[in-house]
Structure formats: C-alpha cells, structure tokens
Image (cartoon, helix red, strand yellow):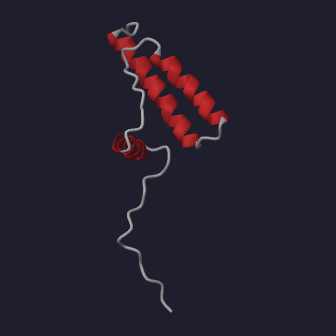
Amino acid sequence: MAKTPQTNLQQRPAKGTPERDRELQATAARVKAPTFTLVAWDRTAPGLIREWAIRAARAGAPANKVGSALCYAAEFDRWQADHGSKIPD
C-alpha cells in the first residue's frame, strides 16, 4: 500500500528561528498570554537578553534559540553604540 502524501499539513518553522519567534508571538497574542518587550534604547536590555540566554541554555533550550538571543543582544549593543541608550521610563 502506497503512502498518502500529506500536502495539506503546514510545516512549522524550526525552533529558534525568527519565523518560529513570529509564530510564537502570534500564538501568545491569540491566547492573550502575557509578554514582555525590550527595546534597543533600553540601557539594561542587552544584559537582560544575555542573562535570559544563559538561563535558557541551562534549562535545555535549543542552541539555535540561545544563539538567536545572543545575536539580538549584540544587535542591541550596536544600536546603542550608534544611537545612545537611556534608563527605562
């Protein structure tokens, strides 16, 4: 008996990718789950992201998710170097 192709099933984005992050954000919004947003001008943001990455790695998060977070922290650092930062108000 031949296998039936499952062409109607959508493949989910890989964990730790920006596409998967967007999917999770949409899901959180749909179920009204609380979220917390950091903005690049927040002086504390890069360090908070790095701390989250350390904790996530220790908890067993996928390496690409941790790596993605560390890339965001570096991007925040670059943004702050170019534009400045401030204490959250």
**In the orientation shown, which residue stands out farthest toward the bottom?**
1
What is the x, y in percent for residue 82?
A: 34, 13
- The C terminus sits in image quarter: top left
Look at 49% across and 43% down and name the residue there: 16
Look at 52% across and 29% down and name the residue there: 70
Look at 42% across and 24% down and name the residue there: 75
The number of callouts visible is 0
Q: In this view, does 31 lie above or below 5?
A: above
Look at 65% across and 37% down and name the residue there: 59
Q: In this view, does 59 lie above or below 77?
A: below
What is the x, y in percent for residue 73?
A: 47, 24
**In the orientation shown, which residue stands out farthest toward the right?**
58
Q: Is residue 18 above or below residue 46?
A: below
Which image quadrant is residue 33 in? top left
Q: In this view, does 4 lie above or below 18?
A: below
What is the x, y in percent for residue 66?
A: 55, 36
**In the orientation shown, which residue stands out farthest toward the front?**
32
Q: Nearer the viewer, residue 75 or 36?
A: 36
What is the x, y in percent for residue 36?
A: 42, 27
Q: Nearer the viewer, residue 77 or 43?
A: 43
Report whether 11 appears left or right of 63.
left
